[in-house]
Amino acid sequence: MGQMKKISFVIPCYRSEHTLPHVIAEIDGKMKTMEQYCYDIFLVNDCSPDGTFDVIRRLCKEHENIRGIDFARNFGQHSALMAGLRHSDGDYVVCLDDDGQTPADQVDRLIGKLEEGYDAVYARYDHKQHSAFRNLGSKLNERMTRMMLGKPPELYISSYFAAKRFVVDDMVRYENSYPYIIGLVLRATRNIANVPVDHREREEGASGYTFKKLFALWFNGFTAFSVKPLRIATAMGAISAGTGFLYGLYTIVKKFINPAVPLGFSSLMSAVVIFGGMIMLMLGLIGEYIGRIYISLNNSPQYVIREKLNLDAGGRKDEER
């Protein structure tokens, strides 16, 4: 009989002191029916302002296979995922939410697809229980990943996914300041599948994603892993220059045909405002790329770990990334 395969669960935690124990209990209950696998759980506290880390500390004392990681400040969900992925060592790694909306008792569906030969598997929800605002953000993010990152149009992306070890090992090679998980998965493989799972209503509280955070995540996605925005800026600049040249010819021809027609101050100002605004927009986009390069050259960390629980003092990786 071959060696038992291991599943590592990675859960970023924020304001989940009441929901987290239920998620852990659900994982434990499900894994008892999947006796062909051993497992461990990595709980990454993203500097939650409530008692989330106290709950993680208690869970780590009660369960030897639960590992706790506490961030020194809030770095965001994707950085928390990267910390958990770096410390994990499972043959399969499963990432899910801490609010109970992603059904941990259906993890066998994701693992089954990996066993079929896929490198990564994302849960697909037919009926999402998010708010209209979150659903709109998800749709915009889906369009962005398709246009900028080359995501296949039929692939559904969610926060509940599983990946094989070699995919995770490639993902954690990324050490720059702005991780974006789906970009890292698509960079490693395109052998990705979807599997239908249920999506539950939130047990309590509200999503931690505000409009500002969703916009920052969306903006990070296409600036961290694609140069298409710069190419779009170049194309828009060429179109604007061509339009201005044609309009100039039109103005000259019109003046020759009818010298009495005034050149038009309003049309001139409109053109100045439009093209000036476009130039400032493109310069801002270029500045964003340059700023990210500068921050990366300064070795700004993805996260800083204050404390580890049930992990070796040194961990598998450095405490700062």
Image (cartoon, rainbow, N blue to C red):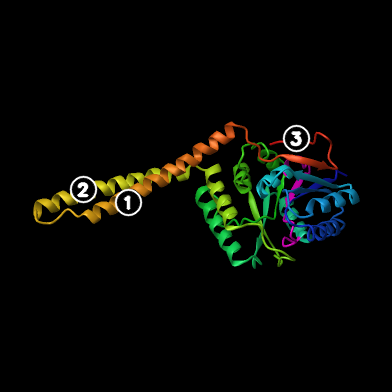
Horizontal side of residue 277 vs 50, given as left or right: left
**First reached walking from the N terminus: tag 1 or tag 2:** 2
Q: Residues within 10 Å of mark 3 (few under 14, many from 20)?
A: few
Quarter location, residue 51: bottom right
Task: Residue type at mark 2: give it.
Answer: Gly
Horizontal side of residue 202 vs 228, given as left or right: right
Which label is found at residue 317?
3
Task: Residue type at mark 3: give it.
Answer: Lys
Is 137 above or below relative to 292? below
Which element is circle 3 on? loop
Q: Which residue is mark 1?
A: 273
Cα gap from disc 1 to disc 2, whole angstroms: 16 Å
Quadrant (top left/top right/bottom left/bottom right) for the N terminus: top right
Q: Which residues are magenta?
A: 85-103
Q: Residues within 10 Å of mark 2 (few under 14, many from 20)?
A: few
Which element is circle 1 on? helix
Are the residues at dot 1 and dot 2 in contact (C-beta closer than 8 Å)? no
Q: Which residue is mark 2?
A: 248
